[in-house]
Image: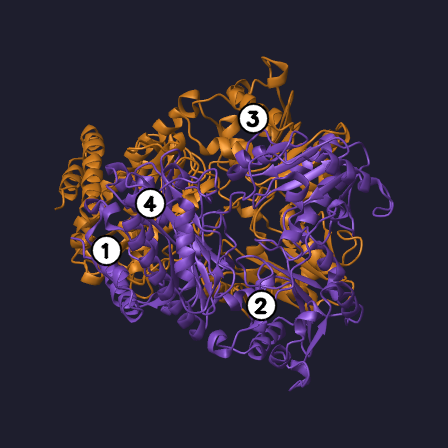
Chain colours: A orange, B purple
């Protein structure tokens, strides 16, 4: 699933009535219980205190106040106005979900003012603009504050979230059971990960590291939770010193003896590996206490995307913001156990998908399969596989024109029936205890048109160009993005999303610091052991959508020469699901591309075929064998 | 010539004796005539007050104080130390040119401290670090000042350049005669360019624009100078208001009546198009006066690479720094007259090079041709062409291992004889009144080895991949860089420089804001009418160097489809010099690549052949016809 891909609303499309809510919010903006002086504007960003991509229901504050539930958007409420900034993916959806108390600010259009410019144009002189400092990232705070100050206003931190004040039925913050990831899955003990982290800290003369990203904390402690749908993480912070480890988490979660044993809470083996536990909420005061005791040269690492609130606790001379934390970097390079786990997960996932496609082929002609029932079937088949935990993101299941909506998720009111006349795109994935999957296949159950085949073939050429690319060690993923587009460009086509994202191992399906996208320059170089997706596409509005996505592992390559001894890398597909030959115009493929397809299908047949046989899934096996016939 | 390519010293290789100079400089650092309080360190950047890439002899201050004359380097002198930061291209050269008063700081190596870190480590507490605010760019000042301040030191502007204080025989600043570029060459009058500039200013509500880059000023006024070798520019500043134009230049240069007429100095046609002239040095006080009279909402544009001194004259609330000025952007898109001029210039340049190669072929077996004499011959042949002004950069002429030094320029002590046994690389170009050229060819006058041919062919494949690429309007050049490398990467090879740079029209051979390089992300999108170089290479240390470079024009392309009506672009080669077939392993070329070569050679033969015939250059014509035989 692409980084730009997100979910359509699962609520209906009638706008939320927000007049009364906005009145209450504006009261709170003047209420001295919450603000020392009235504020003239209140900013409601998306996101939670950990800057998570997916957020828990209790953190959907922007959706609550506006009705708009797209994945990206920032609301600003002043005494007179309520405005919502979102990007082109969501113009239609936002306009349908918000009532006329709201003004939609279409980002990316020339005439749309920035949030700063708009605020400056509507605010009375010397205004105060409030924001929850836990939700806004430090760099966003800085930019906003600068712009407002230069226009005579000020940005103020409002400690009580004013949406929570008016949100009477706000859900509780989840506190799901924690799951211990044994060494057989994690590969490296959390103690060894702490030791490696401290090595990095010592190298850079850093004394403390504040971890705020939920997937980094889960990864480090070899723990998983279920606090956020699709993401096996749990709400926590952690602070690492050279001799201490502080974990901030709902303490009720730590009653399980196995968990206490895993973290060695009761019998610490070594003082420097002893985890001290604190309530989740006490991270602020504890970090304050640490900072109060800093030596003059002590330095504290914190991600530059962490919350403004926590960042500003660290006095500036001691603060060392970093774009990617050492945990983010270490997590991205999968260890051999994780790689084996990812491979196993992808084989199981392929079994489920082979079954799905064999089933679809049989059922579609009956006219009973819809986008939703196909997605449900995919989930059902995956759930039969060993160590299945859940989906890794909401299934994108779209037929005909629906698949041209890049971030489409079927709703009862948009749900189309699969037929033998239209192209079907399914982008889906799951969390297994041994790994995370994410695969897109585009198939036709009748006869695709010449144009559909042509477009599919260009997309496939792009997919192969990335997957088969050989490139020097140290190359950043964004340098490979154009390879995925060259064949489309040559015919005047393109797709408006990135080509790939990092994939976690039984963790978030989107993770940094690597990826393949023209949009970034700040990605970290690809390294053997990193795992990314390779997913070019083509979308013809009102007609069809095409995407071919594999998850691929970065592996060493051995080309003929070795310039400057740098070594080379390439990709090995982890996803092993046949790519539909019926959709290809094989005449447009070069011999090397045909060889790639045949070699890929041979591996699918060998590896997944063996597992299908082991599981006794005969019908899917027959489908697999038929679908992996060599092309000429 | 690549952006990373620069000149070897033309002075000998014995180090400069700098002990006495450093003593004098350190005296000046304590002399209250120049500094209100003694400074503990003095920074000597490369560059002039206009942040020019090539600089005039009077601005070679870092070379004067250290002896090191590479194109990139920053010297810092403290009471105890003298240190020079430069990059990998210059480690050897710098170590040979500097005596042991100097410490070489090898940039890019892990153990090398940054200038800031080094200063902080060697300075006594509360030190003052001085720099000439005219030479340091505003953003560099900001970073350095921040780092020093956070460590308890301060960065101070020293108005008198302390190198000039000790440089008793410093050359005069050149004040060459100005040349008027008629409409038949410029295509657009300077008045129309001013009108367009003011349109951009009005669009962004900007009241003033300070032009500091020499090529932008030359371009705007349709004037050319010769103040800096290879660059037809002249020392000047300009300040544009909505109703006024101020030009700061040595007033002695404006005595020529034709020039006064061109600028309408004596009989201004319209008050808002009246150029007021001021002495070059008065830009500071004049800008101060303008800024003193600014209205509260007035805004001033200045390039963020302009000098700290001039930037800081503009009060911060009024200052709007921009990465690329509207002149830089307008200059990059050549108008039809400029395109025609560039085409003419490239045909003349090709005539000279065909002659050169025909001559070399005949002369080399005699053993009398050296790298230097070949370069001289190239210059002689170019100078026979109409409207020749001079070279556009120092000729890179290297045979065998010398060509593997990317920035090689032959010196008497390194000069090798051309033979039939080694690969010869010549990267050269000229300034003609109608355009600027820059071309690299790599040739063998005997029989190249299979390995040399293989490497050449990969480089050629990269050259063709860029040249023939079709890409959507709005694509930035850096997205094409990997196309140039894919064939090399596949065999484990690469080159460590960018693939292309913008080329001026009878202006600097390197210009922004476009280019083709993995190193930048801040380039502006390619547009029809832009002109860049396409020059991948391969360099095998101690053996040979290969580069294939054409200057290419961005032109509209018409592929089969037109996604979202964006339109597509591709490149048209302006350079029309045969690419040596003898160096190709044609078996490694695809049919499409062979077709490209044949079509390119057909154009060389048609276009340049006609001109050779017109000029009666029979021998070169025969060579051209032979060298452009189709390959199969």
Give the distance between the C-alpha atoms of the residues marked 1 and 3, in whole angstroms: 61 Å
What is the x, y in percent for residue B588? 22, 45
- The numbered disc on residue B218 is 2
What is the x, y in percent for residue B233? 58, 63
Which of these two is toward me, A361 or B26? B26
Could you tell me which residue is drawn at 19 percent across and 54 percent down? A588
- The numbered disc on residue B486 is 4
Q: In this view of the protein, can residue A457 be seen by the observer?
A: yes
Residue B475 vs A215, above or below: the answer is below
For disc 1, the neighbor class at 10 Å (few under 14, some 14 to 19, many from 20) is: some
Q: Are marks 2 and 1 on the same chain?
A: yes
Give the distance between the C-alpha atoms of the residues marked 4 and 2, in whole angstroms: 39 Å
Q: Which residue is mark 3?
A: A197
Labels 4, 1: front one: 1
For disc 4, the neighbor class at 10 Å (few under 14, some 14 to 19, many from 20) is: many
What is the x, y in percent for residue A442? 26, 51
Which of these two is toward me, B464 or A574? B464
What is the x, y in percent for residue A406? 38, 57
- The numbered disc on residue B627 is 1
Chain to which the residue tagged by mark 4 belongs: B
């Amino acid at each position: 699933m692409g980084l730009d891909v997100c979910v359509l609303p699962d609520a209906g499309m009638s706008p939320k009535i927000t007049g009364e809510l906005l009145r209450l919010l504006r009261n709170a903006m003047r209420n001295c219980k919450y603000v020392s002086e009235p504020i003239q504007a209140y900013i409601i960003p998306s996101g939670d205190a950990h800057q998570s991509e997916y957020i828990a229901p209790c953190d959907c504050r922007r959706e609550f106040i506006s009705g708009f539930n797209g994945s990206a958007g920032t609301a600003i409420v002043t005494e007179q106005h309520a405005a919502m900034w979102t990007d082109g993916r969501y113009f239609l959806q936002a306009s349908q979900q918000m009532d006329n108390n709201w003004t939609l600010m279409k980002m990316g259009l020339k005439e749309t003012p920035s949030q700063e410019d708009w605020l400056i144009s509507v605010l009375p002189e010397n205004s105060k603009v409030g924001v929850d400092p836990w939700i806004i990232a430090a760099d966003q705070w800085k930019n906003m504050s600068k712009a407002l100050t230069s226009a005579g206003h000020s940005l103020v931190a409002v400690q009580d979230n004013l949406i929570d004040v008016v949100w009477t039925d706000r859900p509780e913050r989840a506190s799901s059971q924690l799951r211990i990831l044994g060494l057989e899955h994690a590969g490296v003990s959390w103690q060894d990960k702490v030791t490696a982290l401290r090595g990095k800290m010592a190298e850079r003369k850093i004394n403390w590291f504040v971890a705020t990203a939920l997937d980094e904390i889960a990864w480090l402690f070899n723990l998983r939770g279920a606090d956020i749908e699709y993401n096996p993480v749990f709400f926590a912070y952690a602070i690492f010193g050279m001799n201490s480890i502080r974990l901030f988490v709902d303490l009720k979660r730590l009653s399980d003896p196995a968990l206490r044993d895993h973290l060695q809470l009761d019998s610490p083996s070594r003082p420097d590996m002893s985890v001290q536990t604190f309530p989740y909420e006490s991270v602020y005061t504890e970090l304050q206490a640490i900072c109060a005791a800093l030596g003059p040269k002590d330095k504290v690492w914190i991600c530059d995307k962490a919350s403004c609130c926590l960042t500003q606790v660290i006095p500036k001379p001691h603060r060392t913001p970093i774009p990617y934390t050492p945990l983010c970097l270490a997590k991205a390079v999968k260890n051999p156990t994780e790689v084996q786990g990812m491979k196993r997960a992808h084989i199981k996932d392929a079994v489920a998908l082979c079954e799905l496609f064999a089933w679809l082929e049989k059922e579609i002609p009956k006219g009973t399969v819809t986008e939703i029932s196909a997605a449900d079937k995919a989930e059902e088949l995956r759930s039969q596989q060993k160590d299945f935990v859940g989906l890794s993101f909401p299934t994108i299941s779209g037929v005909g024109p629906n698949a041209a909506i890049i971030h489409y998720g079927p709703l009862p009111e948009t749900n189309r029936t699969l037929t033998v006349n239209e192209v079907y795109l399914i982008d889906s994935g799951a969390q297994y205890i041994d790994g995370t999957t994410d695969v897109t296949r585009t198939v036709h159950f009748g006869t695709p048109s010449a144009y559909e085949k042509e477009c599919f073939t260009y997309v496939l050429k792009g997919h192969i160009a990335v997957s088969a690319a050989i490139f020097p060690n140290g190359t950043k993923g964004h340098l490979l993005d154009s390879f995925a587009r060259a064949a489309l460009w040559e015919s005047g086509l393109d797709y408006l999303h990135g080509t790939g994202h990092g994939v976690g191992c039984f963790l978030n399906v989107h993770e940094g610091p690597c990826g393949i996208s023209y949009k970034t320059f700040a990605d970290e170089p690809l390294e053997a052991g990193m795992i990314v997706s390779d997913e070019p596409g083509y979308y013809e509005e009102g007609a069809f959508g095409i995407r071919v996505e594999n998850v691929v592992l970065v592996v060493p390559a051995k080309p003929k020469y070795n310039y400057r001894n740098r070594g080379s890398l390439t990709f090995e597909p982890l996803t092993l699901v046949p790519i539909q030959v019926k959709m290809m115009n094989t005449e447009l493929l070069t011999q090397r591309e045909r060889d790639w397809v045949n070699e890929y299908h041979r591996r699918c047949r060998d590896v997944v075929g063996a597992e299908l046989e082991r599981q006794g899934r005969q019908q899917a096996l027959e489908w697999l064998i038929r679908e992996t016939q060599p092309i000429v």
